[in-house]
Amino acid sequence: MTTGLDDVIAAETVLSHVDGEAGRLIVRGRDLEELAGRIAYEDAVALLWEGLVSLDGDPRAAIGRGRERAFRLLSPLAPHLRGLAPVEGMRLLLAALPDAEPAQAALAVGAAAVAAAMAVRGAQGLPPVAPDPEAGHAADLLRMLRGGPVDASEAKALDTYLVTILDHGLNASTFTARVVASTEAGLLSAVVAGLCALKGPLHGGAPGPVLDMLDSIGGADRAEEWLDAAIARNERLMGFGHRVYRVRDPRADVLKGAVSRLKGRDNRIAFAEAVEAAALKVLARRKPGRRLDTNVEFYTALLLEALGVPREGFTPLFGAGRTAGWVAHAVEQAKAGRIIRPQSRYVGPWPAEAA
Ligand code: ACO
């Protein structure tokens, strides 16, 4: 038995498949590269939910209504967000939504975007910005977060990011959401649980620390020495390694392409590439038994930085995109109709036998 449940198959799903040997991500029968940057997030959500959740009307309008309803429910809580880490503010907001709400699935996706934006602003003492239910989801999310205009190339980059992270097999947060759904606790409870699992630095909490690492390295000429010393101190290099991928995470290339299409990022990308090359060299030397490569978080950090998102906002945005995946898995699990209840092997002491 491994403590990380490696190789245990705990669910059957039609939603997504991670091929760790080939570096391939398949979502509802399509390769990621067929979807990210090619279809809008709302349409990707509708594709993921096909046959599981029916959206009332066209996906963009249904999710827009979800944002609008969420803002009505959540904006009175804005004064409680000041000084909270944004991911904790987002958790507070989503936890306030009752499981009994109608149109829960679209509400969950809308609420995750509203809560992410509100929590990032609220942490800085800024008032929430109301959604525009007619706007595209990515553009509206970025506008609500910034409180200012968003140009088309920025909206497109965020849209590509949200589609890229929509779903990813039975990762830690998705498994958590499925466990909660299996108890029939409700969809919104499953989403809150997913977010709690996502926030850890080994999962969705990594991209902020990626930028901290780049700051600390400072210049390309120092990268190899810095990274080597970090491994010698037994630290993990953020944005590298993965439980399933044995090759480069396909999402890294999609996101690198998306950030490269934004203006004025050439120097930053060149620096990141130099750090990435040095990290792969150091990891190959220091961890020869294990092929470690770049994961999704490395270029997520570069992309969200380019969009002006503060680093504490990276995990909330990840949660906003992944909520649709948690919802789909929660519905699929609830349909399976059986509580998830594995067993542990007891290795503690036994009571003394009665004399
Ligand atoms: N830096 C340095 N060493 C690493 C790294 C890394 N990023 N990742 C794994 N290793 C090492 C481990 O320390 C271990 O070495 P050891 O046997 O000498 O102790 C060896 O590689 C094997 O570890 P794995 O079994 O491959 O790692 P595991 O599957 O348990 O963990 C994880 C996967 C958590 C992603 C890990 O690679 C990590 O901590 N990466 C850094 C954090 C990160 O980027 N997280 C985001 C992941 S993507 C996502 O969740 C969205």
Image (cartoon, rainbow, N blue to C red):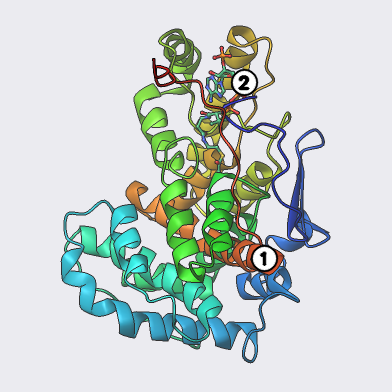
Find residue 342 and report its horizontal and vertical position in percent: 60, 42
Q: Quadrant of the C terminus?
A: top left
Q: Nearer the viewer, residue 178 or 233?
A: 178
Find residue 170 and report its horizontal and vertical position in percent: 65, 48
Residue 90: mark: none
Identify the residue at horizontal 16%, vertical 70% (top origin): 79
Find residue 65 and report its horizontal and vertical position in percent: 48, 87
Q: Is residue 189 left or right of residue 287?
A: left
Which quarter of the picture shows residue 242? Answer: top right
Q: Residues within 10 Å of mark 2 (few under 14, many from 20)?
A: some
Identify the residue at horizontal 43%, vertical 14% (top origin): 230
Q: Is residue 204 visible?
A: yes
Q: Nearer the viewer, residue 322 or 299?
A: 322
Q: Quadrant of the N terminus?
A: top right
Which quarter of the picture shows residue 308? Answer: bottom left
Q: Nearer the viewer, mark 1 or mark 2?
A: 1
Residue 337: mark: 1
Q: Is residue 259 visible?
A: no
Q: Is residue 55 left or right of residue 114?
A: right
The image shows residue 152, relative to residue 195, as above or below, that is below
